[in-house]
């Protein structure tokens, strides 16, 4: 049952639900459609079950998102932040130009959705443990992509599988950077 649900969620996340355009690229998947998919994915692949819906979400331009990332004291390049979750406000901040058909972009939403689940579970965010958990689940999402692609009839080749694994490893290493940044605050 879990495998079937996982495949169904991944097919939706990979863009199978988005109608195509004349140039064969899928229509961009916006936040309105992506947020429920991210919630379902987190519920299916974490200890968080029956996560309440995200109460509020706000679409921000790249510059506005960078300003929000600075406000949150986010680690990394503020200009590249695609999503952020504010527990005290129960609000998800998302880049207005994001296309969640992109696996990397969707992985950021999944990471922040984990923070939403942690907040709803009354955990204190901004700790090394909560960041490691969010990065671990984000990396698991990447590692599940070959299953989804195969279910869509587009099984990845060895080079694509290796690129996916490299991305997952990179995400896991980012947890170490996030934890180091937390220690300097």
Image (tube, rainbow, N blue to C red):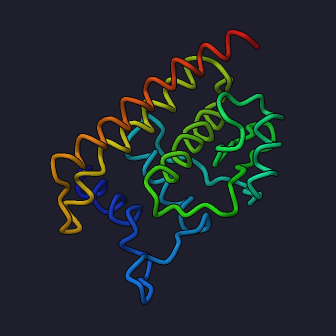
> In front: 104, or 115?
104
Give the quarter of the figure containing the C terminus: top right
Residue 2 at what x, y percent from top left?
Answer: 26, 50
**Residue at (34, 58) in percent of width and height:** 10
Direction from residue 148 to residue 121 in the image, left or right: right
Q: Quadrant of residue 108?
A: top right
Q: In the rendered image of this protein, does residue 25 appear above or below residue 74?
A: below
> In front: 99, or 4?
99
Direction from residue 76 to residue 11 in the image, left or right: left
Residue 89 at what x, y percent from top left?
Answer: 81, 43
Residue 61 at what x, y percent from top left?
Answer: 76, 58
Q: In which quarter of the image is residue 123?
A: top right
Q: Quadrant of residue 169?
A: top left
- Report the residue that reaches farthest toward the top: 183
**Residue at (61, 36) in percent of width and height:** 115
Residue 118 at what x, y percent from top left?
Answer: 59, 33
Q: In the rendered image of this protein, does residue 152 appear above or below residue 123?
A: below
Q: In the rendered image of this protein, does residue 52 appear above or below residue 139?
A: below
Q: Number of labelled discs?
A: 0
**Residue at (70, 43) in percent of width and height:** 79
> In front: 58, or 8?
58
Q: In the rendered image of this protein, does residue 150 appear above or below residue 111?
A: below
């Amino acid at each position: 049952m879990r495998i079937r649900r996982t495949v169904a969620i991944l097919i939706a996340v990979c863009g199978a639900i988005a109608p195509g355009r004349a140039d064969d690229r899928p229509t961009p998947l916006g936040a309105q459609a992506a947020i429920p998919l991210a919630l379902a994915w987190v519920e299916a692949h974490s200890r968080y079950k029956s996560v309440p819906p995200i109460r509020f979400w706000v679409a921000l331009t790249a510059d506005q998102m960078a300003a929000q990332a600075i406000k949150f004291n986010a680690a990394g390049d503020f200009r590249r932040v695609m999503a952020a979750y504010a527990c005290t406000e129960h609000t998800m901040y998302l880049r207005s130009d994001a296309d969640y058909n992109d696996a990397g972009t969707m992985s950021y939403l999944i990471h922040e959705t984990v923070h939403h689940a942690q907040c709803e579970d009354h955990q204190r965010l901004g700790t090394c443990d909560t960041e490691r958990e969010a990065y671990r689940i984000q990396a698991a999402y990447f590692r599940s992509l070959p299953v989804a692609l195969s279910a869509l009839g587009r099984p990845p080749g060895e080079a694509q599988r290796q690129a996916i694994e490299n991305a997952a490893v990179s995400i896991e290493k980012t947890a170490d950077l996030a934890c180091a940044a937390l220690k300097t605050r």
